[in-house]
Amino acid sequence: MKLNTLEDLLHHELKDLYSAEKQLTKALPRMAKAADNAELRKGFELHLQQTHGHVARLEQIAEGWGKSLGRHKCKAMEGLLEEGKELISEEANEDVRDAGLIGAAQRVEHYEIAGYGTARALAARLGLADAASLLQQTLDEERETDEKLTELARSMVNEAAAAPDQEG
């Protein structure tokens, strides 16, 4: 794909985000299953529902713009998710694993926040107000998820992981 215009760049960004979200829909159930903390598991399950909505918004943008989003692989998300998968497979104390899962999830969220922020800015610059609005909705949800993960880590998961006499 040649990137000669901002439209080309936005299309590339949307394809990358679409691939990332599709990969995440497969990874979140594994992360939920691996989580010992009920609130963390519930958070992953909720974010899976949101992620399906993110995919639908991207498809809506592409359809309205007359573009296709398929045939692209987000290698960054693939790497982030592979690291999370490796964490899940490690022999670990459950509380410590939960703390690690939060870290892995936040790396994913930060990647998505950067991507959606870029795509939203490009759409706005190109005068694609509807696309920019949809991208902003997703960006807001990604930020909210990141904040919830931080709060969960601070309020219970990291404390449990730091407790003396841990099993394992």
Image: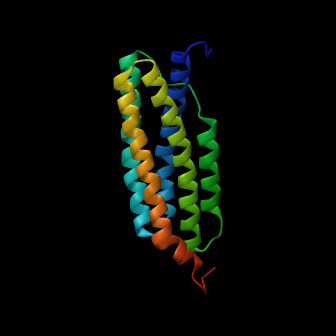
Q: Residue at x 57, y 82 (%)?
A: 163
Q: Is residue 41 above or below residue 129?
A: below
| Occupied quadrant, residue 76 | top right
Q: Residue at x 60, y 74 (%)?
A: 93
Q: Estimate the x, y position of residue 79 in percent, counting from the top left.
A: 65, 44
Could you say which is closer to the camera, residue 134 or residue 126?
126
Left or right, 65 with reference to 100? left
Q: Estimate the x, y position of residue 30 in percent, counting from the top left.
A: 50, 55
Left or right, 65 with reference to 166? left
Q: Residue at x 35, y 19 (%)?
A: 64
Q: Estimate the x, y position of residue 148 in percent, counting from the top left.
A: 43, 58
Could you say which is closer to the camera, residue 126 or residue 55?
126
Outermost residue, front direction?
125
Q: Residue at x 37, y 53 (%)?
A: 46
Q: Is residue 148 above or below residue 27?
A: below
Q: Is residue 77 above or below residue 46?
A: above
